[in-house]
Image (cartoon, rainbow, N blue to C red):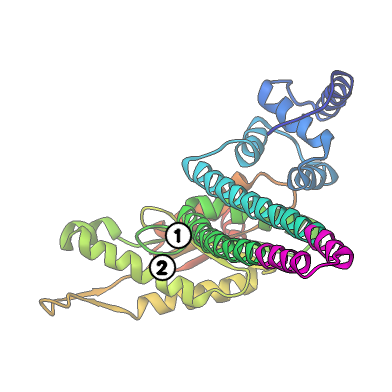
Amino acid sequence: MEYSEDLEQASAYAAKAIEHMSAQTIPATPTNFAIWYAYVTEKYPDLKKALDVLISNKQTFTSSKNAELYDKYFTHSEEGLALQDTSKKIEDQVGRVLDMIGDASSGVEGFGDSLKSNLGDLANSGSLDGIKSVVQNLVQETQKMQQSNAELQQRLKASSTEISSLRQNLEDVQKEAMTDALTGIANRKMFDTALRKAAMESMETGEPLCLALTDIDFFKKFNDTYGHQTGDQVLKLVARILSENVKGRDVAARYGGEEFGVILPQTDLKAAKVVCEQIRNAVSTKRIRNRQTGEEMGNITLTIGIALFRPGEPLADLIHRSDEGLYFGKGNGRNQTVLETELETVEAR
C-alpha cells in the first residue's frame, strides 16, 4: 500500500491510529499499526468497513484476529502478485489507448488549422495556379488525415485485442487461485475468504449463518485398498454432489484432504440440516465401481457436523464447533449429520 501524505498529515494519522489501537487494547506492533493507519486514512473501504463492523459488535481484537486482518488486507501471495502483474498490464495498455486518442485529437486540431489556412488562401487567391496549389495542399492534408485515422484504427484494434486477452487472463488467474485443482470446487483459500465475508454480512444483517464440515468415512482404508487414483475419483464425486446440492450464495469447498466445508448464509440450523441430509443421502446411494474391471467397491458415506455462527465470535470457534460435531458423529457410528445443539444435549446428561 502506498501513501502520499506530507509529514504533518502523516503524523496526525499516526496519532489517530495509535489512539484507536489503545482504545481496543491492541499492541502497537508494526503489522497492527499498518492495519489501523490504513483504517484512519479511509483509503481502503473494504478494510474500514470490516473494522467498523467488528467495533460495532464489540469484537475483541485478539492476536489471531489481528493476524487474520493483516493477512487478508496486506499480504500478497504468488497468485496475488500474478493478479497485480496482469492488472498493471491492463492499466498500461489502457494508458497507450489514451495516448493514441490524445495524438489523434492533436492531429484533428492540426488538420482543422491547416484547413482554415488553406481555405483562407483559396479565398484570397486571384489566379488559377494559386487555386490549384491550395487544392493540392487540401488533398495532401486530407490524405495524411486518412492515413493517420487508418493507423489509429489498427493500433486501437490491436490494443483492444490485447486488453481482451489480458482481461481473460486476469479472470483465469483469479479463478485458478480460488479453485481446488483436483475437484474443481472452491479451495481452502476461497473457503476462508467466503467465510469471512459471510460472517461480516451476518453481523450486518442479523441473518443466520451456518457452517458444515464433512469428510468421507473410512477414506484412508478405501485409498489403501483401491489406490489413490480411485480415491481421487471419489473426491471428485463428493465435490460434484456438494455442488449440485448448494445454491445461491452457498459455498462448497474442499477444506483439506478428504474433508469438505459448506458455508450456508441466511440459513439456520434446522434448514442447514435439511441441506446436509440431502448431501449425505445423495452420496450414500452412489455405488462405486471400477469402470475398467467392473469391480464393485461398495458405497461411501459422509459424517457431517453443523454449527451456527455467533455474531462477533472468532471464526476459529465456529470451525471448532463444526469439527466437534463431525468427530462426535465419527465416534458414534458415522454416516450421520450432527448439530452443535445435539452436543449440548449430550453434555447436559
Which mark is nearer the camera, 1 or 2? 2
Q: From mark 1 to mark 2, how far is it between C-alphas?
A: 8 Å
Of the two numbered discs 1 and 2 on the same chain, state the one appearing first in sequence: 2
**What secondary structure is marked by label 2?**
helix
Which quadrant of the figure has residue 73?
Answer: top right
* 144 to the left or right of 185: right
Which quadrant of the figure has residue 109?
Answer: bottom right
Is 120 within the magenta?
Answer: yes
Between 66 and 171, the one nearer to me in the picture: 171
Number of marks in the rendered image:
2
**What secondary structure is marked by label 1?**
strand
> Circle 1 sits on which residue?
260
Q: Residue at x 36, y 53 (%)?
A: 257
Q: Is the residue 129 above or below the residue 106 in the image?
A: below
Query: Decide: marks 1, 2 in contact (CB < 8 A)?
Result: yes
Between 160 and 214, the one nearer to me in the picture: 160
Per the rendered image, the range of residues in magenta is 114-142
> Circle 2 sits on which residue?
239
Between 155 and 344, the one nearer to me in the picture: 155
Q: Is the residue 189 above or below the residue 287 in the image?
A: above
Is 92 within the magenta?
Answer: no
